Image (tube, grey):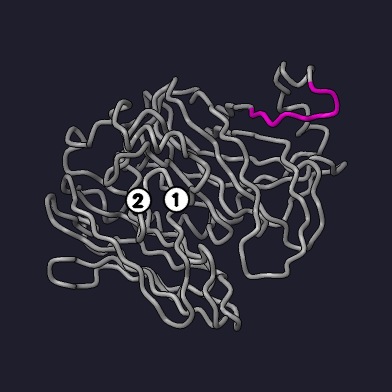
């Protein structure tokens, strides 16, 4: 843990620099050619089946997962209810040994002659589930990454990474909604994951950390949001000790904050505030990077903690499934051998696997 202080300062600097490093969208014909249609498409005239392709760029040390096409239908925005389309979960075999050190998501127009990016606000969420490892706090498969409209590109420094092995099975899931009432016939998602190849200097291994204010395994973690100010909270007990290096999260419109507390003494450990429009719509949720203490933010085994979301709904009526809140980030276990094992026969795990993509927004 001695290297963490300097590593985290690089993390803070690299996040800002990474925003300008995005590659442009490929042209529509190149996108369509990069994702082969499954054989079953031949028996369905007039239908395009969504598929995915994995590209290994050894020179840039990037893995790119390209998926599509997706049709995003224009809708009349006449209510405050979220209208979106969930896409099928696409299973992907991870192609290399090593460590993932970040991620970014692009939504591209597959009908454009040149490379054309679609509005990032059309992304409700895009995520990757790792069927080869368990979540720390819940009997679920690991959510390796997830991105919403408020999520910037995440880039860890070169000495930090999440371990993945060649052949690990990942599931790409996503949901979209239009922003201007226009239909996009062929949208493609590109998930880019920088990686550290095996055989290089062994990085500091971090693991995804996720805690939800309303965790429901196999179902939606969203809740009906009452008018006015309200809070939703959930407690968890740490199964092992370690340190949080960085925290972000996901919330919906009208959220004011999401915070992590010590449930045994009420001390606020982290508070992430939102940036909202004048009418309460979400612009961004704050992030927190720890680097002033070598240990990061320590969490202790067998200790109880609490995630609390605060909302202020000004509409005067209940918003069906209008609330959602989670915190997620990078966690360094004191002893990774104590990480809970994934039990595929566990009833909760089975229920979770069956529901991947249907209710997800884990960042």
Q: Position of residue 235 (x, y in %)?
A: 24, 59
Answer above or below: position of 4 versus 218: below
Q: Position of residue 47 (x, y in %)?
A: 80, 29
**Lateral position of residue 218 relative to residue 30, left or right:** left
Q: Which residues are magenta?
A: 44-52
Classed neighbour count for the residue bearing mark 2: other residues with Cα under 10 Å, few (<14), some (14–19), many (≥20): many
Q: In the rendered image, which residue does mark 1 sit on?
A: 362
Q: Are dots 1 and 2 in contact, CB under 8 Å?
A: yes
Q: Secondary structure at mark 1?
A: loop
Instruction: Identify the residue at horizontal 45%, vertical 26% (top origin).
Output: 169
In the image, 161 versus 14, the foreground residue is 161
Answer above or below: position of 6 versus 58: below
**Res 60 → quadrant:** top right
Q: Is residue 306 magenta?
A: no
Instruction: Identify the residue at horizontal 56%, vertical 46% (top origin).
Output: 126
Q: In the rendered image, which residue does mark 2 sit on?
A: 210
In the image, 132 versus 165, the foreground residue is 132
Instruction: Identify the residue at horizontal 69%, vertical 31% (top origin).
Output: 50
């Amino acid at each position: 843990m001695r290297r963490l202080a300097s590593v985290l300062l690089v993390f803070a600097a690299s996040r800002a620099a990474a925003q300008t490093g995005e590659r442009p969208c490929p042209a529509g014909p190149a996108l369509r050619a990069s994702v082969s249609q499954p054989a079953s498409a031949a028996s369905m005239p007039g239908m395009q089946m969504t598929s995915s392709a994995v590209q290994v760029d050894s020179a840039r040390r990037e893995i790119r997962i390209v998926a599509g096409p997706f049709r995003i239908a224009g809708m009349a925005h006449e209510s405050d209810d979220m209208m979106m389309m969930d896409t099928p979960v696409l299973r992907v075999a991870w192609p290399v040994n090593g460590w993932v050190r970040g991620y970014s998501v692009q939504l591209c127009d597959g009908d454009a002659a040149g490379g054309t990016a679609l509005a990032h606000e059309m992304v409700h969420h895009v995520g990757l589930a790792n069927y080869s490892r368990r979540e720390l706090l819940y009997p679920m498969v690991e959510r390796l990454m997830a991105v919403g409209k408020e999520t910037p590109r995440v880039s860890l420094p070169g000495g930090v990474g999440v371990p993945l092995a060649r052949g690990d099975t990942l599931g790409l899931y996503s949901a979209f909604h239009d922003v201007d009432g226009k239909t996009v016939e062929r949208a493609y998602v590109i998930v880019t994951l920088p990686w550290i190849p095996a055989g290089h200097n062994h990085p500091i291994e971090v693991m995804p950390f996720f805690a939800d204010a309303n965790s429901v395994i196999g179902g939606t973690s969203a809740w009906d949001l009452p008018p006015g100010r309200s809070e939703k909270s959930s407690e968890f007990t740490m199964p092992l000790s370690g340190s949080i290096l960085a925290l972000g999260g996901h919330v919906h419109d009208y959220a004011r904050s999401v915070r992590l507390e010590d449930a045994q003494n009420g001390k606020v450990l982290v508070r992430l505030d939102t940036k909202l429009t004048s009418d309460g719509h979400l612009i961004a949720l704050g992030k927190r990077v720890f680097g002033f203490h070598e240990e990061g933010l320590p969490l202790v085994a067998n200790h109880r903690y609490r995630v609390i979301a605060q909302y202020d709904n000004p509409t005067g009526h209940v918003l069906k499934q209008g609330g959602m809140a989670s915190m997620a980030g990078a966690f360094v276990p004191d002893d990774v051998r104590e990480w809970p094992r994934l039990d595929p026969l566990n009833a909760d795990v089975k229920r979770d696997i069956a529901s991947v993509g249907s209710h997800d927004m884990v960042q």
